[in-house]
Amino acid sequence: MSQAEFERLDLVPEEYIGLGDNVVVVVRFVDRGRESGVPIDERLCHVWTVREGKAVRMAVHSDREEALRAAGG
């Protein structure tokens, strides 16, 4: 899947949860298929690992509880 497949790509952060070196970000992904017109409204969770003020890793999880477990919460 690439951004070219969509009309406009909106990733809206809804919640930030700090857990040591990790930050869980609940993100709402809102868009519409460029050719199909099918709307997309989905929540995903990003787990960012930050060291010395720099992002060193990011993983995507399909639900909040899974992301919290992965982040050590």
Image (tube, grey):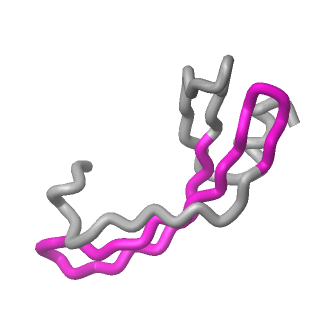
- Kindly identify the residue that appears in the image at 55 percent across and 21 percent down: 56
Where in the figure is residue 9, as x and y percent of width and height?
Answer: 32, 64
- Kindly identify the residue that appears in the image at 52 percent across and 66 percent down: 12
Give above or below for 21 relative to 26.
above
Q: Is residue 61 left or right of residue 36?
A: right
Give above or below for 58 relative to 30.
above
Where in the figure is residue 7, as x and y percent of width and height?
Answer: 20, 72
- Kindly identify the residue that appears in the image at 65 percent across and 65 percent down: 14
Q: Is residue 45 magenta?
A: yes
Q: Which residues are magenta?
A: 17-46
The residue lying furthest to the right in this view is: 73
The residue lying furthest to the front in this view is: 53
The quadrant where residue 34 appears: bottom left
Where in the figure is residue 33, as x and y percent of width and height?
Answer: 23, 72
Q: Is residue 6 left or right of residue 43?
A: left
The quadrant in which the C terminus is found is top right
The residue lying furthest to the left in this view is: 35
Magenta residues: mostly which secondary structure? strand
- Kindly identify the residue that appears in the image at 18 percent across and 60 percent down: 5
The quadrant where residue 52 appears: top right
Where in the figure is residue 41, as x and y percent of width and height?
Answer: 47, 74
